[in-house]
Image: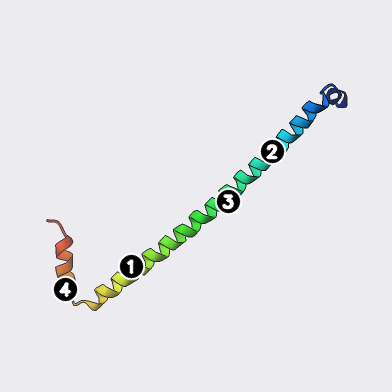
Amino acid sequence: MTWLLALIPSPIKRALAWSAAAALALLGAWIAGRREGRQAAKSEALRKDSEAKADALEVRHEVDQKSDADVRADLGRWMRD
């Protein structure tokens, strides 16, 4: 196998080595970017989920504070016949 490498001129070997190093660097950057993007998406989803839970708790609290007649009146505006 080494005799095959001996047939390749040294400038071409050098160019292949630099190309391989650049490809590995790009691959590493791409993998790191995907990982950061995935983590950012998870944190954004958690933030939205916590906001939705807070909104739901607030609405539930508002409904609990109303009388039954007020709740029925509010629901009557949203129902279709």
Residue with the mark numbered 3: 35
For the point 18% across and 65% down, the residue is 75
Residue 5 placement (x, y as % from top left):
84, 26
Question: For residue 20, which numbered disc appears in the image?
Answer: none
Residue with the mark numbered 1: 56
For the point 54% across and 55% down, the residue is 39
Query: Which amino acid is tagged 3?
Result: Arg
Q: Secondary structure at mark 4?
A: helix
Mark 3 or 1, nearer chain start: 3
- 61 is higher (above) or lower (below) than 38: below
Q: Are marks 3 and 1 in contact (CB under 8 Å)?
A: no
Closer mark to the observer between disc 3 and disc 1 = 3
For the point 69% across and 38% down, the residue is 22
Mark 3 or 2, nearer chain start: 2
Closer mark to the observer between disc 3 and disc 2 = 2
Query: Which amino acid is tagged 2?
Result: Ala
Query: Which amino acid is tagged 1?
Result: Ala
Q: Secondary structure at mark 2?
A: helix
Residue with the mark numbered 4: 70
Residue 68 placement (x, y as % from top left):
18, 75
Q: CA distance from mark 4 to mark 3?
A: 50 Å
Q: Secondary structure at mark 3?
A: helix
Where does the N terminus fall, quadrant-wise?
top right
- 29 is higher (above) or lower (below) than 44: above
Closer mark to the observer between disc 2 and disc 4 = 2
Mark 1 residue crowding within 10 angstroms, few (<14) / some (14–19) / many (20+): few
Residue with the mark numbered 2: 22
Depth check: 37 or 53 in front? 37
Residue 76 placement (x, y as % from top left):
14, 64
Write down the quadrant of residue 59 in the picture: bottom left
Q: CA distance from mark 4 to mark 1?
A: 19 Å
